[in-house]
Image (tube, rainbow, N blue to C red):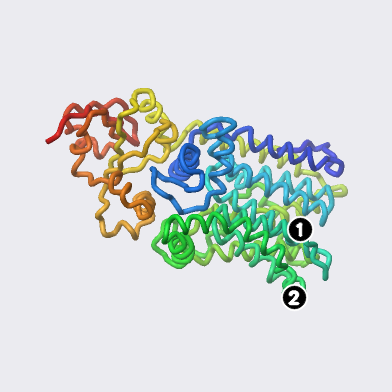
Amino acid sequence: MPFSPSADTRRTSPTLLLSLLAAWLLATLGWRPLLLPDEGRYAEVARAMLHGDALVPMLDGLPFFHKPPLFYWLDIAAMHVVGENAFAGRFGAMVGAWLMGAALLVAMRRWHGPRAATIALGVLATTPFFFIGAQYANHDMLVGGLIAAAVLAIARAVDKPPQVDLRWLVGGWVLCALAMLAKGLIGVVLPALVIGPWLLAQGRWRQVIGLLHPLALLAFVAVAAPWFIAMQLRYPGFFDYFFVEQHFRRFAQSNFNNVHGAWFFIVAMPLLTLPWALWLPVAVKRAWAGRGAVNGLYTWWLIAVLGFFSIPSSKLVGYALPALAPWCALLALAVSGTATGGQRRAWPWVMGAAALACVAIVGAVAWKAPQSSRALALQLAARIAPGDTVVMVDEYYYDVPFYARLAKPVVIASRWDDPELPTRDNWRKEVFDAARFAPALGKQLLKPPDKLDALTCGTGTVWFIAPPAEAARVSALPGAERTFSDQRADLWRVPAHACP
């Protein structure tokens, strides 16, 4: 969403700016195939819910409770309109990004004026971290956008002390509830961690108490609670798995992937936000000067979010997205402050170059299409019959059911009796955990790898998808024919036969 050097940022309509932001994010949403594992996993969960139970996230036909359903519901809505494709699979992320931009624009127009707000939206929109996050099908951008909107709404509710604006407060709590439906407890924990200490540091404890208005809390419970209660009633043990295991144990344990030191986000944020991070020294100097309560909010917001996610050993760059709005606000104020008077106004040209870089990154990924099974899935879709069975051997190819439009779950042959399986953070653990909530179906779908011949007993053709390392095992089956092969997987057709 670049701006020309002659653009009058003071007169640009917010409606026009947000329409341009939507067009900017939507234009490249369907350019590239789904990447593995995240995009294939979450897009297929949404597709399975579209054709099954819209309340229960499903992974290979099994209840999948790693994340709540809001992202999937948004994708389902998009699939109803544009079909089951990568565009729809990323729609939830795009919505989160647009909400972040809208919230930042509205807040900064009030606190800093139209010019600074317009520059801030441009900085955010052309930051590669933001743009790629908006084009990536997982829950991080959605929860990041909702948390940003919640923090800014609640800050607006208390920006005229000692009063608390009830309309903005209720809106903020509703946004927290939606953030909780997007990714869990951080949807309410992070806004509380940002707003509470910020107010207390200014001695505004009466407003802290005012944040707990009964109407606001009731709105939060009315939006957030029903789905979680329904899942616990339907699947006993859901609360323990979702809240205790997926939140507290995961936060405290160190046996998950992507282990990094406490330095991780300090290094990652400037790199992910180039070229705008070049204004970081000016932004730090302005923040250190402590000009106003709102600048203090931006600074504490960054410290709270990045500090919170620096505690666990497992760190992903997407965890920093809830801190992107204040980061870009501080950078935009630095850009705005250095682009006045007789100084050379370089920022519009930087914005144009940054926009081109964002599009180039998406184009490069679309061209290379790393770790996509789309070609194999399309081959399978062209040849599979309604009564056929699909078996994946020692690997789960998340995007194959999505692209092949499979109507029933696949059988997965792997070492399900491995005692180390519950301790490893990988696809096996995801499927294994899901089977805990539907053990009978799990027994039908999760099979040992040394009994592949038994899976071909019946009347329909069996299609085996296996990595090249398993070629000898599959090729030994009677009548096995390899119909597709690439560096990631082979597709085998094995005719069914009668078994004793």
Q: Position of residue 162 (x, y in %)?
A: 83, 70
Q: Position of residue 89 (x, y in %)?
A: 53, 38
The reply to whether the C-beta atoms of the residues labelled 2 and 1 are less than 8 Å apart is no
Secondary structure beneath disc 2? helix
Q: CA distance from mark 2 to mark 1?
A: 18 Å
- Horizontal side of residue 325 vs 119, given as left or right: left
| Front: mark 2 or 1 | 1
Q: Residue at x 65, y 66 (%)?
A: 192
Q: Which mark is residue 85?
A: none
Secondary structure beneath disc 1? helix
Q: Position of residue 420 (x, y in %)?
A: 29, 59
Image: 67 above or below 94: below
Image: 288 above or below 258: below
The quarter in which the N terminus is drawn is top right
Q: Nearer the viewer, residue 231 or 18?
A: 231
- Horizontal side of residue 365 vs 20, given as left or right: left
Q: Residue at x 78, y 37 (%)?
A: 16
Q: Nearer the viewer, residue 23 or 456?
A: 456
Question: How many other residues sit within 10 Å of disc 1, few (<14), some (14-19) or many (≥20)?
Answer: some
Q: Residue at x 60, y 33 (%)?
A: 28
Q: Residue furthest left?
A: 500
The quarter in which the C terminus is drawn is top left
Q: Position of residue 204 (x, y in %)?
A: 77, 74
Q: Residue at x 45, y 55 (%)?
A: 234
Q: For the residue marked with disc 2, what is the amino acid?
A: Trp
Residue under label 1: 168
Q: For the residue marked with disc 1, what is the amino acid?
A: Trp
Residue under label 2: 205
Q: In which quarter of the view is residue 476 placed? A: top left
